[in-house]
């Protein structure tokens, strides 16, 4: 975090990850504003304000004259906030809850409105915690993949994350 660049924008601030393996990506189709990107199982997944898309990971090897067409993941139309690779799954934090992709198949793992990001819990390799529009939820990492475990009691406010630190807000101006 200390070697990244923060920018003041017209509508808020943004962080540039200086050492990110991605720099600029152009597709033939309009996929919206980018929020997250992960390389997973031979694909580059792109989380945008219009949904989740993917392009083949080797697209950069064919030269600059070949601009890829991003393929939409139809189950994830709408705002994607974050992506996380967890073992053999890609986790998606989405406006409509949370999803996991394994073997190119998608399943919903949390179905309440809105999730922000997935964070590891220091010293606990069997769980992940996630901030949502309505509090914190915990996931169990098991043989069948990541599954919803429980919602944390006593926290019903939006809980997001900046640089691995959870923050809460009661949505009041």
Image (cartoon, helix red, strand yellow):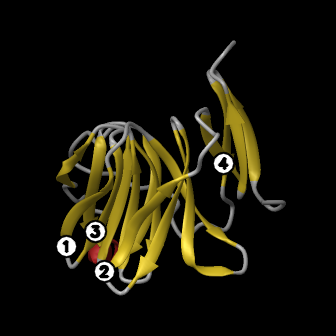
Sequence-wise, the earlier of marks 3 and 2 is: 2
Q: Which residue is mark 2?
A: 41
Q: Out of 102 and 4, give the one closest to the viewer.
A: 102
Q: Residue at x 38, y 36 (%)?
A: 113
Residue at mark 3 to residue at mark 1: CA–CA distance:
6 Å
**Residue 126 percent across, percent down from the top left:** 54, 80
Q: Which residue is mark 3?
A: 101
**Residue 122 percent across, percent down from the top left:** 72, 74
Sequence-wise, the earlier of marks 1 and 4 is: 1
Dot 4: element: strand
Q: Out of 90 and 56, give the one closest to the viewer.
A: 90
Contact check, label 4 and label 3, Cβ < 8 Å: no
Residue at mark 3 to residue at mark 2: CA–CA distance:
10 Å
Between disc 2 and disc 4, the foreground one is 4
Contact check, label 3 and label 1, Cβ < 8 Å: yes
Q: Which mark is residue 104?
A: 1
Q: Is residue 114 left or right of residue 59?
A: right
Q: Which residue is mark 4?
A: 161
């Amino acid at each position: 975090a200390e070697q990244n660049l923060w920018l003041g924008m017209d509508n808020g601030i943004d962080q540039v990850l200086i050492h990110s393996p991605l720099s600029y990506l152009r597709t033939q189709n309009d996929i919206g504003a980018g929020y997250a990107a992960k390389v997973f199982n031979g694909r580059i997944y792109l989380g945008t304000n219009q949904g989740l898309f993917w392009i083949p990971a080797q697209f950069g090897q064919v030269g600059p004259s070949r601009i890829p067409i991003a393929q939409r993941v139809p189950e994830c139309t709408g705002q994607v906030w974050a992506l996380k690779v967890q073992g053999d799954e890609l986790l998606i934090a989405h406006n409509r809850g949370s999803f996991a992709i394994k073997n190119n198949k998608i399943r919903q793992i949390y179905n309440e409105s809105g999730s922000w990001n997935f964070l590891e819990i220091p010293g606990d390799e069997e769980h992940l915690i996630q901030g949502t529009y309505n509090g914190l939820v915990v996931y169990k990492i098991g043989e069948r993949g990541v599954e919803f475990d429980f919602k944390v009691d006593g926290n019903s406010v939006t809980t997001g994350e900046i640089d691995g630190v959870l923050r809460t807000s009661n949505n009041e101006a």
